[in-house]
Amino acid sequence: MTTAKDLFIIAMDLKHSVGQGDLSLALAGAELIDLVGAEAVAVDGDRIVPGGPPTLDDRFMDEAAAALTRQAPYERIEDWLWRRGRDLSAAYQAALEENGELKPQRSGRLSFGSERVEPVDTPARRRATDRWKEKEPVLTALASVVGIDDERSDEEAGLDDEAVTTVVAAVRDAVMELEAVRQRRTIENAAFANLWRGP
């Protein structure tokens, strides 16, 4: 199990409305934090310095490690989040559905309601839920960045590792940047619609 998988399960489990882009950036950050923990990378300022191969037995972690830039100057954390995060939420969902860890759930009583997915009761789900109940600092911090359970402390409380704190801060910046892009598009679209409507 990885922090990214736990974060994805929590996002699905709590049925919290999280944008796919926001969640994808947070998943990329979670992968990077696990790579730091596995000593497969180190964080030097805002750069990701590759180390040895990850010791985690996980397909996504192997993909993440393989995607690292291994030549100096190494990749900036922010650039990694955007590159690795592209469609990452959808990739996690597809993998969990394929493994039978997510099941479709129809809302409402009628069989033609909108379809969504929910985690199946598995050891992986129980582990993610346990980490969430224990307010595990990394999982809580990343969830907070994407707006899950806002009443929890938004300070990086309990993050005693400088590299982890740096990654969480980079994820927060990237999510804020994505929101700014969304707002700008909304304003531009509204202005364009008004232009066509005329005075």
Image: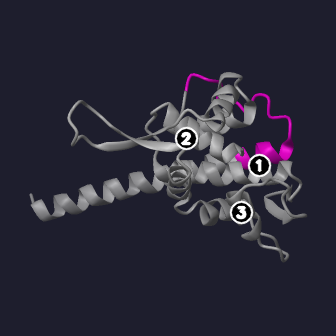
Crowdedness near tag 3: few (<14), some (14–19) or many (≥20) residues, C-alpha within 10 Å: some
Disc sitting over residue 146 in the figure: 2
Question: Which segment did they paint magenta?
Answer: 150-168
Q: Secondary structure at mark 3?
A: helix
**Residue 89 x %, y %:** 53, 53
The residue drawn where x is 56% and y is 51% is 99
- The amino acid pointed to by label 2 is Val
Vertical position of residue 79 compared to residue 120: above or below: below
- The amino acid pointed to by label 3 is Ala
Name the residue tied to disc 3: 64
Q: Quadrant of the C terminus?
A: bottom left
Indicate yes or no whether the magenta region holds residue 151: yes
Q: Nearest the camera: 114 or 86?
A: 114
User: Principal SS element in the magenta part?
Assistant: loop
The residue drawn where x is 69% and y is 48% is 30
Q: Earlier in the sequence, mark 2 or mark 1?
A: 1
In front: label 2 or label 1: 1
Marks 2 and 3 in Cβ contact (< 8 Å): no
Name the residue tied to disc 1: 33
**Residue 60 x %, y %:** 68, 58
Q: Secondary structure at mark 1?
A: helix
